[in-house]
Amino acid sequence: MTMKLFDAHCHLQDPRILNKTPQLIATALDTGVVRFAVNGVSEKDWNLVKEMGESYPSVIPCFGLHPWFIEERTPNWFNTLKEFFQITPSAAVGEVGLDKGSHGKKIDFNDQVQVFRRQLELAKELNRPVSVHCVHAFGDLLEIMKYGTVGMDKLDCFFSKFNQNEKFFDVITFASRSCYASQLPYLLVDLDKDSLNLSSTGPFPAGVILHSFLGSAEMVPEFAKLGAYFSFSGFLMSMKKEKATKMLKAVSSDRILLETDAPDALPNGKFGSLFLVDGGIFHPEGENSSSNADSLRDGDSHPSKDASALPRETPNHPANIHNVLSYVASLLDITKQELAELSYANAVRLFSYEGSKFNK
């Protein structure tokens, strides 16, 4: 049976690989990767993503403002974003998100929250899936998906003491003098001054893709209740095997996706040959170099024990989703064919919204 794969999150418009995108897509298609969800990250690349979606039937365009680039946004960024969705009915939302990691901590988190929340609400309004970047901020993400803001978990017990007839001023005055005072800035951003509207933002029937997911097993059911899908890339190989296995087994089989995040997240190469963007093929030491992968394109062979022998800046190739497939299947103790079939079916279902390329 022919194996079909769906790269649920990548960046084929990235300047590091843009001039080789036609070649990369052709090679990936030859290996059975038949769909690519290409995520924009800033106003500067949304048009590139749009053009890529128009040029390649296999590309699902996605538009979003990534947290790393929010400081570069123009005053009209949100209207521009909405216009891209109006003229591109096949598009999903992404990449958006929250980041408290080494890069993201340089960017004001309150600003990240507001930009992310607006895009999350837009995705729900459009009834389209949204691909989410989350680094060291899963607790905040869960709160925003539930309530539309952060700090609400700590305020739940506080608000439970008040009925809906309490005056807003009285409630806020009390809160400002209590242990909840530090949470007020988050609460007041968009709180209706006439009433305390605590209705949930989620769930998200169109789906929320937690891309390159590295969260805990304990968080999986909480996100799943809100409509989350869990997408796995080469970054999963950086997680301790025991923790990764526990987390994967907590994910329902109808919520698993695979991705490359190319040109990032290069797999470590221990689970098969790696395609290199420069045209070569990397072989783990001892692997049979006469595999199908070798026959698909010409290039230099690079035998070694693992991908650590490659330069750190080596860009990832969308065909390397096969390595992710092999690794995830091994942890779940299922065949690659089984995982390919279920992850592909999940992705097709997720990206079959009104106007999508699957509904034409």
Image (cartoon, rainbow, N blue to C red):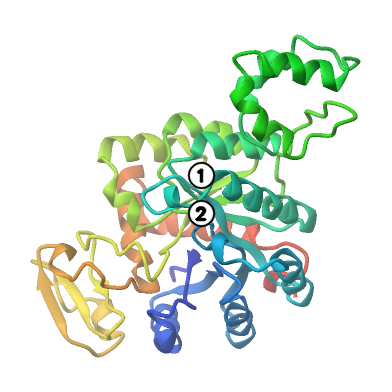
Q: Amino acid at mark 1?
A: Ser
Question: Residue, x 64% and y 43% (percent of image)?
Answer: 227
* 314, 219: nearer the viewer: 314
Name the side, left or right, on which 303 lies relative to 164: left
Q: Is residue 176 above or below residue 128?
A: above
Disc 2 element: helix
Q: How many marks?
A: 2
Disc 1 element: helix
Quadrant position of residue 262: bottom left
Name the side, left or right, on which 101 lies relative to 75: left
Q: Is residue 279 above or below residue 350?
A: below
Dividing the image into 4 quarters, which one contains the C terminus? bottom right
Q: Which mark identifies residue 132? A: none
Question: Residue, x 44% and y 71% (percent of image)?
Answer: 2
Q: Amino acid at mark 2?
A: Leu
Disc 2 residue crowd, few under 14, some 14–19, many 20+, Cα 10 Å = some
Q: Can see residue 23?
A: no
Q: Which mark identifies residue 253? A: 1
Dividing the image into 4 quarters, which one contains the N terminus? bottom left
Picture coordinates of residue 294, whole percent (x, y): 24, 81
* 163, 327: nearer the viewer: 163
Question: Residue, x 72% and y 73% (percent of image)?
Answer: 84
Q: Is residue 328 above or below residue 194?
A: below
Name the side, left or right, on which 315 lies relative to 130: left
Q: Which mark identifies residue 342? A: 2
Using the numbered discs, state the Cα–Cα distance from disc 2 to disc 1 in whole angstroms: 7 Å
Q: Can see residue 188?
A: yes
* 142, 246: nearer the viewer: 142
Picture coordinates of residue 4, whole percent (x, y): 47, 69
Question: Residue, x 36% and y 34% (percent of image)?
Answer: 246
Asked whether the residues under the numbered discs 2 and 1 touch, taking CB atoms below 8 Å apart as contact, a structural biologist would say: yes
